[in-house]
Image (spheres, grey):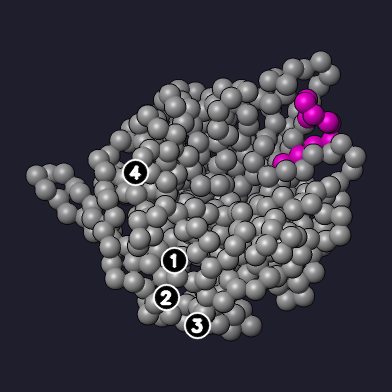
Amino acid sequence: MARLVCVAGLLVIAAVSAVAEAGLSKGYSLPVFPREDSVQKDGETGTELLFLTNAKYKDTNLYFHQRSWLADSSLILFFSSREQGGLMGYVVETGELTQITAADGTKLHNPTAALNRNSVFAMSGDRVLEIQLTISVKERKGVKHAKVTARERALCTVKGVDVYLNESCDGRYLAAGGGNLEGAGKAGLLLIDEVTGAWERLCDMPAGVTYHGHVQWSITNPYWISFAGEPDRLWVVDIRDRKPWCPYHQQKDEMVTHESWWLNDELIFCGGTHPKPTEDSHLKAIDLRAGTVRIIGEGSWWPGASSAEIAKRNWWHASGSPDGRWMAGDNWHGDIMLFDGKTSRPKSLTTNHRTYGSGEHPEVGWDRKGKQVIFGSHKIGGVTCCVATVPEAWQKELDGTRIGLEAK
């Protein structure tokens, strides 16, 4: 059965790729700008840090549960406030920057990198587009320079989308949501077929639930989509029966926030039971089929502590590497902790990327291989995107532990 599923998935990918290629516009060149990047080591942890820009403008990473790296990891997506900014890309091989626009030059929003090909799904106004990117690198006088060419495919036009587009793990659909889709006066989720571009309303909000966005697809289950609501935060809908259900009902004053998908039908999220402003916030994982919840990264709370002290020891965004090895949590001081996905042991990756009470949150996202994370940093002045590489020694330590367990 598993083999049949894999074959079916390959057929879907092939079909989408063929249609995408047929519907693409003529190629158009994207502007390429000189590199601004710099590298340093974290003074406390020794982790290698790559700052994509020089922080003269407000440059921020995509939201933490979006794909920021192209399928072949040749380019990293981010946003910039500069005049020729908007959606931009960092060319990994050369360090140069490129502005990514629609064929008519308009800026893009709500982007995510495609799962299986070097494309970006994004919106220009109400238009949903696929922007296919081709990067070629030549060396002149010992210096490498990139040429970036784009081709556009229009999928559909939908009014009222107010969250990032998010692609299914089989590359078949895009999902999105909005508080007033197509002027219908009520919030809901929609599906967009990547082959045909046809879209349909998937579901409305359940009675008594306020829509809070955060629409995202399971990274392993092609049928499950989650979204955020209120008063209960966590909601899931199966695209086959289209009936939203809540996997975790909150208690009074319990905080549940900033969730993302993990392996094996698990959602990871942050939260605790002490009310604001001095809440505790653990990094947790819920098995949606069993209904069980476990703490991966423990937060702390104690009487009389200040909000800043509490924030130093608690987690705010939860994200997992796609290979299942790590989970990441960040706090309001800009510290990033990794937790071993098997043992839950913590590893401090990097610290002090934000001043408590001001600035952008790190909102840690993962690369395609589970080797690097991207996040917002104020360490070199204004906010910029920082990429931290997981130390190889940590990876070897995990490999050694697992080899020992297998031997036993």
C-alpha span from label 2 to label 3: 14 Å
Q: Which residue is mark 1?
A: 130
Quadrant housing the C terminus? bottom right
Q: Which residue is mark 3?
A: 11
Residue located 41% across and 57% down the image? 70
Judge by depth and name the residue closer to the eye, 383 or 201. Answer: 201
C-alpha span from label 3 to label 1: 20 Å
Residue 3 point in image, percent of width and height? 57, 81
Judge by depth and name the residue closer to the eye, 348 or 101. Answer: 101
Circle 1 or circle 4, nearest the eye: 4
Helix, strand, or loop for circle 2?
Answer: helix
Which of the marked residues, 2 or 1, is nearer the chain's N terminus?
Answer: 2
Whether tag 4 and tag 3 are in contact, CB under 8 A, the answer is no
In the rendered image, the vertical position of residue 81 relative to residue 202, given as above or below:
above
Which of the marked residues, 4 or 2, is nearer the chain's N terminus?
Answer: 2
Q: Which residue is mark 4?
A: 84
Q: Look at label 3 and name its amino acid.
A: Leu
Judge by depth and name the residue closer to the eye, 349 or 93. Answer: 93
Crowd rating for badge 4 (residues with CA inside 10 Å; few <14, some 14–19, many 20+): some
The segment highlighted magenta reads 270-279
Circle 3 or circle 1, nearest the eye: 1
Whether tag 2 and tag 1 are in contact, CB under 8 A, the answer is yes
Q: Which residue is mark 2?
A: 20
In the rendered picture of this protein, how many numbered marks are placed on residues? 4
Judge by depth and name the residue closer to the eye, 283 or 193. Answer: 193
Which of the marked residues, 3 or 1, is nearer the chain's N terminus?
Answer: 3
Residue located 44% across and 34% down the image? 58
Question: For residue 222, what is the image quadrant?
Answer: bottom right
Q: Look at label 2 and name its amino acid.
A: Ala
Crowd rating for badge 2 (residues with CA inside 10 Å; few <14, some 14–19, many 20+): many
